[in-house]
Image (spheres, rainbow, N blue to C red):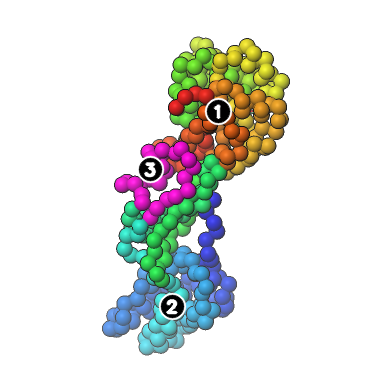
Amino acid sequence: MTPDPAPTLRDHLREQPPQDFKVKAGWRALIQALRLRRRLGGPASAFASQQAVDRALSRPLLAPDVADLSAVKSGLKALLLSDLDEEARCAQAQAVDAALERLLPQEAQEPLWVAVTGWPTGVNAATRARIVGVDPPLPGPLPPLAAARLRHRLHGLVLAGFTLQVEVALPDGQVLPALPREARADTGRWGRAAPWLPHLDEEGRYSLTPRPIAEAQARRLKGQAGVIDLFCGCGGNALAFVLAGLPVVAVDRDAGRLDLARRNAAALKIPTPPSFCLGRAEDVLPGLIAAHPDWVLFVDPPWGGPGELAPDLDALLPDTGLRALILSHPRLMMKLPRAFDLRALPPRAGGFTLRLELGEDEGGDGQTVRMLTVSAGLGG
Ligand SMILES: C[S@@+](CC[C@H](N)C(=O)[O-])C[C@H]1O[C@@H](n2cnc3c(N)ncnc32)[C@H](O)[C@@H]1O
């Protein structure tokens, strides 16, 4: 994900003595003194509002001068002294203002040229445009704040083993604007849409394929003879397949979860539910392939827990015999974590096809890549 940003002015000042006063009150006193200085005919300051101060505090500082940090902190404390006359107040404010100017590099004001590179091979322009969320598409100019947001959101993001780079052409000596605090919060979070199946246990809830993605995966299997869903969980994919008219065998080794999948099929009033099969994939797959040699094998193994995960093949499919059987199946579709390195898959005739699955605009994560669908032998 995005590398840790440099410490901000706020971080540096927190460490800087003196510590024995209310810094917030010091900033308020500075703003008042800077306004007073202006009213008395002095120069305007870039730090004469709470908003400007908040933005300054959020700015990263690469190599701040300790003397300047000290001037700011002790100046803020001095401004709280009750017996300062107007002239002394203005002089103190002037010293803090000048130190802040020296500490904070100039933020870019004009549009900046931005490019996003490092995409996994095979991701089409429409998907790239949705993820970047910029029209007309990049490379192209962006307002500085939009460039900063994009960089924060995508720079260093690993997709299918490839690392995205957001390259911003900054004039010498300028920096990107600091993002407001809320924009710096985690941007890769899952959407908040309610789960689409009613019967779920904890693992079933976080591993449930969202309905639009499960439906899109099912649509891509239209015309196939049937599907073996080898790790069916509470049924997110298996039920989307049967709803799309495909015959399905749904396997899980967990009897409780298989029962939840059955109850979900009943809740959706599905006339032809999957044929449910309790068992370990490694035990039942050879027999299922023998019974349905031309069916698609759909594989959504456990990723190891909720959240941002990047398990490799050893973690996803530890049984090497099962793994070989799966990866050589003539018609294959796999749901994998978004960071999974595609280059770890063994070569096969026709290769693998990658699709980045995005969240939903209504769920607030329409630009977020939630998972990969990797297929083979399905055409297109
Ligand atoms: C990621 S969940 C499947 C989620 C499902 N696609 C959905 O959308 O609801 C993986 C499931 O694989 C099952 N599982 C794990 N190891 C297994 C194995 N060796 N054989 C069969 N099932 C297994 C787990 O019990 C879990 O329910």
Which residue in the structure is indicated by mark 1? 349
Q: Which quarter shows the C terminus?
A: top left
Q: Which residue is mark 2?
A: 102
Residue 305 visible in rendering: no
Q: Callout 1, which amino acid?
A: Ala
- Give the secondary structure at mark 3: helix
Up-down relation of residue 90 to residue 139 (above or below): below
Distance CA(mark 1)–CA(mark 3): 30 Å
Please name the residue shown 48% across and 66% down the image.
60
Count of numbered badges drawn on the protein: 3
Look at the image and give the residue range highlighted in magenta: 114-139
How far, Cα to Cα, is label 2 from label 3?
A: 39 Å
Q: Few, some or many C-alpha atoms within 10 Å of disc 2 (few <14, some 14-19, many ≥20)? A: some
Q: Position of residue 356 (x, y in %)?
A: 48, 37
Residue at (47%, 30%) from the top-left corner?
213
* In the image: residue 96, left or right of residue 344: left
- Is 136 within the magenta? yes
* Residue lying at 43% horizontally and 56% vertically, measured from the top left: 167
**Up/down of 380 relative to 111, above or below:** above
Query: Label 3 crowding class (10 Å Cα cut-off): few <14, some 14-19, many 20+?
Result: some
Label for residue 129? 3
Q: Position of residue 305 (x, y in %)?
A: 63, 38
Which quadrant of the figure has residue 178? bottom left
Q: Give whichever of discs 2 and 3 has the lower sequence position.
A: 2
**In this picture, residue 311 sits left or right of residue 22:** right
Asked if the magenta segment contains residue 305, the reply would be no
Look at the numbered disc 1 and give the secondary structure of its residue. Answer: loop
Verify CB contact (< 8 Å) between mark 1 and mark 3: no
